[in-house]
Amino acid sequence: MKKLSARGLSSKDHIASRTTQGRQPKARFLVRELGGETWPDFARIVEKHNGVWGGCWCTAFHLKRSEEKEWAGKHRALKERLVRADRSHAALVYDGPDVVGWCQFGPPAELPARMSGFNRLGEAPTDRRITCFFVDRDRRKEGVGKAALEAALRFVAAKGGGTVDGYPIDTRGKPYSSSFLWGGTHSMFTEFGFHPLGALGASKWIMRKVVRSQ
């Protein structure tokens, strides 16, 4: 697993949960990047949740429509192959020895799927995408998603920065099932300095941030 620069996020930095404003945070999470060394930890949490999202293994954005049939039922093998080839990236959030959530990020070449809505907006292509989040069902509402997003942005900065797009849901304060919040929330992205580019539907947005290189 790669170490990042001293000015960026190290592979074993700690990030405090932001879930309690004005009070001591609930937890301090260890953050590491997905890679060959951390693959077993990632695989363990995915297996705990039966492959997540119906056996996706967080591969949906890796696959072009023409490739979906080829890899049907083989998502675990695909994900491991991509990770070990350094073609799949995520910020893994640990509590002790266990991964409790992650945020996937990477350039469009690694994550080419579901770009049609973006293309209709007429914006310049982004340098990197933040495509999905996952939080252990036993650890939700503890700030894991925010810790993952913060870490992903710092990993991006250490890799050269650039424009970063996310695809969150604007909940408008209404309750949503966690299953529908895999892209994060509009309020969370706003908190981290993203601005909206346009809507992809009634509640889904494209939001963008420029991340400086570190």
Image (tube, helix red, strand yellow):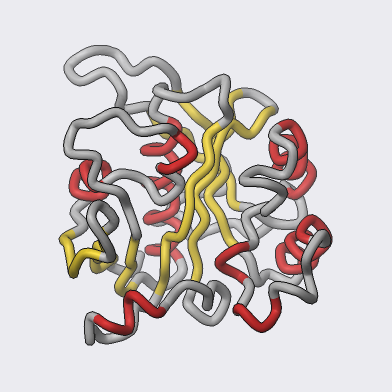
Question: Where 77 sits versus 20, above or below?
Answer: below
Residue 24 locus on image (x, y percent): 29, 13
Residue closest to the eye, 129 or 211? 129
The C terminus appears in which quarter of the rendering? bottom left
- How many badges with numbers are in the image? 0
Q: Residue placed farthest to the front in the image?
A: 202
Residue closest to the eye, 98 or 125? 125
The N terminus appears in which quarter of the rendering? bottom right
Query: Residue at 49% of width from left, 29% of height from top?
Result: 29
Q: Quadrant of residue 180?
A: top left
Query: Residue at 45% of width from left, 34% of height from top?
Result: 178
Residue 2 locus on image (x, y percent): 64, 60
Q: Quadrant of residue 70?
A: bottom right
Query: Residue at 60% of width from left, 63% of height from top?
Result: 60
In the picture provided, is 53 more to the left or to the right than 177?
right
Query: Residue at 50% of width from left, 68% of height from top?
Result: 106
Question: Where 82 sits versus 24, above or below?
Answer: below
In the picture provided, is 112 more to the left or to the right than 19?
right
In the picture provided, is 138 more to the left or to the right than 141?
right
Residue 140 locus on image (x, y percent): 47, 25
Question: Where 189 sits versus 5, above or below?
Answer: above
Residue 211 locus on image (x, y percent): 28, 65
Residue closest to the eye, 30 or 63? 63
